[in-house]
Amino acid sequence: MTGQAQARARHQQKVEELCAAAIRALSGERDLHFRGRRLHRGTRALPLFAPHLHPSLDDDDFGSFRGAADGLALRLSRSDAERHQRLCPHEPVDRLVFELLEQLRVESLAPEGMPGVVRNLRHRFEQWSLAFHHAGLTESVHGVLLYTVAQVCRARVTTEPVLEQIEGVIEHTRAGLAPVLGVHLFGLRRDRQDQAAYAEHALAIARLVGAAVRASDTQDGGTAQRGEGDEDEERAAFSLLMDLEGDDTAALATPVAGNSRVLEDAPGGYRVFSTAYDRQIDAATLVRKPLLIEYRERLDRRIAGQGVNLPRLARELKALLAAPTRDGWDAGQEEGHIDGRRLAQLITSPTERRLFRSERQEPVANCLVSFLIDCSGSMKEHIESVAMLIDIFVRALEQAGVSSEILGFTTNTWNGGRAQRDWQRAGRPAHPGRLNEVCHLVFKDADTPWRHARTSIAALLKADLFREGIDGEAVEWACRRMEGRAEERRLLLVVSDGCPMDTATNLANDRHYLDHHLRQIVGRREQSGGVAIYGVGVGLDLSPYYGRSQALDLSGSTGNQVFREILEMLAGRGRR
């Protein structure tokens, strides 16, 4: 299972890299890449465009991925996104149909000199069409209506015939649509070179179809012709409710990271005015014992309601983090390396074939995973979900044989404290560098098992620990701790909901002093290769700071999907 999971992750990454390269080549846009199986331009996720553009490794062949890539490239190069957005209707069904018709238009404009692109596009649409039908989604009133519209419109716009296997499925519905949509279907083919003129016909078709779906809902009372939940399944499969502006990750904020002139001009680089008040402390010593027990009980209640499959998570983590390691030899084999100790049997038992031995290998996770948690003030609203997430992860890592530690960073005071007062007494020299008292917290060290550290981990819930954040120094501190360990592989996951922030430091230097330093530290550490650093953004895209990152939405339940997203990041499908 270990080899299969790793091979699957590598295969997914390779397919996405090949598709992204094809899209960049055909569209002429350089800043395109896949992240979390979604096409991004820079740090922003692009719209979903159409339901047939999202193949799956589990169900589709590589030709489908090539067809989807070509379709995405044509959409980016042959469609005016601003004009399309202005015209796009608001009703979900109308929007889906209008979106699909625009995708069909650009696919009909595939260059004649690229017959391979045309074949790829046709192959992908045909595979999607068959999968939709075989899933039973054409058995509902809405499903067959939308399916027929997709088939008829594509056949008219591209002049390619409908698949023979589905002719019978759509025949009755197509006969009913012909008199209603006939004029507009003709207009789609005629005006496909003119996006604005084409849109008039596409809008008319979208509104007619949307009205038919809504009328059916009203007439049926929403339940007459469908079993409970059937409509939700149908809509999900056909992407009726897909967010055409982007997914949740795209909607998340992205910090504006700038360069600090003060830091660039300083001859010695990043400065710290005073380290006299800095401290590193075990977080549990800051919380009264009864309160710590109360926090732990609260955390346990939240975790119990999540329904996370801990053994499965442990297996997946081991598959990602373990490497085959020699673990002795298996003797008495019929093939492999000749076993010198058994050569005498050739004389005593000439027919004996078990004269060989094979090397035994076991997956061993010689790895350390460190969680570095931003304990700045804004994290207080997220910390219970974060604590729950990390507590479960640490337990799963322990089951997988992986060492882990939980660290945090904050400041001793707000707005500088004693370090700032020392600077003021010194006459406020220009550009003093960091002007606050850093506080580095240890919630669990790498040598302490989870069951001994479980109470200490609950100290994360103590609200008055959360003040300001000096991220760059914290990342450097965490990396130094990890480099002092014997594990061969080291992963640092920085969990944060914002950019570095210390009011006193920013006012005395400039507003990008700390985030510029964070980018310097991460870049230098990634270049040295001793520690792999990942940014886990809580409601924020941290890609301006971390080359490998994943934005999480923890506003709802911290269920299996959140763990899946982090696993994908560790498998190499986060942003690079």
Image (spheres, grey):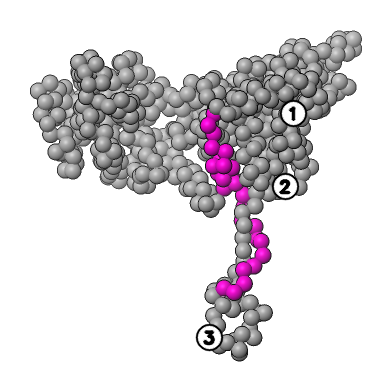
User: Pointers 3 and 2 in contact (CB under 8 A)?
Assistant: no
Inspect the image, locate mark 3, and give the three-letter code of the amino acid beneath it.
Answer: Thr
Name the residue that disc number 2 marks: 487
Describe residue 424's horizontal placement relative to residue 571 as left or right: right
Q: Left or right: where does residue 82 sit relative to residue 556?
A: left
Q: Which mark is residue 358?
A: none
Q: What mark, if any, has residue 456 been given in the picture?
A: 1
Sequence order check, earlier mark of 1 and 3: 3
**Can residue 158 be seen in the rendering of this structure?**
yes
Residue 192, visible in the rendered structure: no
Give 289 or 341, whichever is nearer the viewer.
289
| Left or right relative to 22: residue 197 | left
Which numbered disc covers residue 351? 3
Which is more toward the observer, 522 or 206? 206
x 54%, y 80%: residue:
353
Residue 155 falls inside the magenta stretch: no
Give residue 388's quadrant in the image: top right
Picture layout, residue 502 above or below residue 444: above
Separation (CA) of disc 3 from disc 2: 47 Å
Q: Kindly indicate the quadrant of the structure image that contains residue 38.
A: top left
* Above/below status of 89 relative to 192: above
Verify whether residue 329 appears in magenta.
yes
* Residue 251 location (% of width, % of height): 48, 21
Residue sitting nearer the eye, 42 or 399: 399
- Point out the stretch of residues depicted in magenta: 306-333
Q: Which residue type does callout 1 highlight?
A: Ser
**Cα distance between the residues tagged 2 and 1:** 24 Å
